[in-house]
Image (cartoon, rainbow, N blue to C red):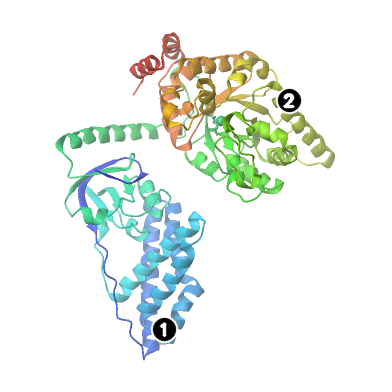
Amino acid sequence: MYKGIAASRGIGIGSICVIKEHELTFEKKKIEDTSAEKARFNDAVEAFKAETAAMAEDIRKRIGPKEAEILEGHLVMISDPTMAGEMGKMIDAGQCAESAVEAVCDMFIGMFSKMDDDMMRQRASDISDIKVSLLKLLLGIKDIDISKVPQGTILVAKDLTPSMTSQINKDNVVGIITEVGGKTSHSAILARALEIPAVLSVPDVTTLVKDKDSAIVDGTEGIVYVNPEGDVLSQYVIKREEYIRKQAELKNFLGKETLTADGEAVELFCNIGTPKDAKKAVECDGEGIGLFRSEFLFMDNNHLPTEDEQFNAYKEAAVTMNGRPVIIRTLDIGGDKDIPYLNMKKEENPFLGYRAVRYCLGNKDSYMIQLRAIVRASAFGKVKIMVPLVTCVEELRAVKEMVSEIKKDFDEKNIDYDQNIEVGCMIETPSASLIADILAKEADFFSIGTNDLTQYTMSVDRGNADVAYLYSTFQPSVLRSVKNIIECGRNAGIPVGMCGEAAADPLMIPLLLSFGLTEFSVNPVLVLTARCIISKWSKKEADELAEKVMSLATEAEVVAALKEAAKE
Ligand code: PEP
Ligand code: MG
């Protein structure tokens, strides 16, 4: 068994075809007839452009415009006068075309691979792809035709370049394994778009396997089995069928309302960290943003983001969601989230320390900037403010007071904003849970943060492996807390959502439906899974299960009962 990066979900079982790397060696000779050499180079560039344009067109039709952009980017790069111009100059000076292509591409590869930005580093692999293609054209080397591999093929390569991936026929290729590449590499993006299971970054895989070896690619877990034993194989055959069945079932939920089995509608929102993620939420069919973790804007920066920088980010999310709710959680730092430029004091007990709303209310000038940016963004969509780590009603009141001040100021200056902008709070501390009835009278909405609520209720550091056995949302104490919060919110007539990880847990969903949760906020990739599970439970069935589960004494009993009742 080999482990790698789980880059594209699913299970592929088939026969290996290793794509060998050709030796792209050539003799660096001095050229006398530079115009003939230039013509040879230009022919190669034209052939490259024609091949790439054809492949891009093919990808556009077979996969989609977004994926075709990768190859179109290659066309833009080779057409850039700097790159081809530099190569031309070297040929004019008497270098052979191969040598000019290699030197110029290597220079750009070196430059891009040193950059901090992931997208920029990706340019290095694009240029490497261009270099290999041009050298092959110049040297007259023909690759194996990936488009013609037989059905049931698992492709194994050092790296799967976009040009190689573009030739893949998804009816024949059932898996991809490479030695390099990560979750955001182009090969991963294309593999996901083609829905072919892929495991990347398996060290030395091209030398560890040979053509016609049988293999299993588990792209969900990032595992590869080569020549698997009979029982592993039979287990995986069942797993694959199960996976295919579930995926097909999930597609039926695309574009649908989120309804329980008895037709009650609930909201299914997404958790995001950057405004760009809002696009992902839309693609995944999320119905709104239930948690925009604004601290990522601060963490990905080397200075406090200005009011305009923040406003633009919040506005982008609001515009992308096109009128659907966008709940922006104000800065939640401290605990495990540090922002170096804020020079926060080192604390003995950071999870119980000066964090989240406590820090913000202690630094009102910078908090004001964030609140102003959010209120301004409310002119562009249904933006809401959410306060993290509330423990007492004074904190909520203080934030609301600041928002009122901002509104007054904006009214005087004629700055546009949503007059009805809501201010809600996260309920993620035992204190907030115990006074949920009091908070519900003053908050516009609640969102339960089970990640922290579990940590604080159970008194276990959520990142400490030694006490992880106690960290479970299925602990009777945590379930009682969740139930109480939802009841208090409902009694006061305010909406109650959940943005902690538990909202997407298939075992938890029926309990939440029974307690009366009306908004589930989950990772975008889990939207359809959550919608599918929700659709399987009626209120009556969920209530029966909840009644039984809430009478159990231990976490193990709770989990066992929920597993027994789980609907596949
Ligand atoms: C939570 O605590 O459940 C939550 C959603 O917030 P975070 O995970 O960002 O602390
Ligand atoms: Mg939290």
Query: Tag 2, which secondary structure?
Result: helix
Q: Which mark is residue 210?
A: none
Along the line of sight, the residue nearer the viewer: 452 or 91: 452
Q: Is residue 427 above or below residue 251?
A: above
Mark 2 is surrounded, within 10 Å at the Cα level, by few (under 14), some (14 to 19) or many (20 or more) other residues, namely some
Where residue 235 sits: x, y (%)? 21, 33
Mark 1 is surrounded, within 10 Å at the Cα level, by few (under 14), some (14 to 19) or many (20 or more) other residues, namely many
Q: Quadrant of the C terminus?
A: top left
Along the line of sight, the residue nearer the viewer: 378 or 451: 451
Q: Which mark is residue 91?
A: 1
Closer to the N terminus: mark 2 or mark 1?
A: 1
Query: Tag 1, which secondary structure?
Result: helix
Q: Name the side, left or right, on which 213 lies relative to 389.
A: left
Q: Residue at 70% of width from left, 31% of height from top?
A: 421
Q: Is residue 149 visible?
A: no
Quarter of the view holding residue 218: top left
- The outermost residue toward the left is 230
Where residue 348 sits: x, y (%)? 58, 33
Where residue 253 sits: x, y (%)? 42, 31
Q: Which residue lies under the disc numbered 2? A: 397
Query: In this figure, what is the number of numbered marks?
Result: 2
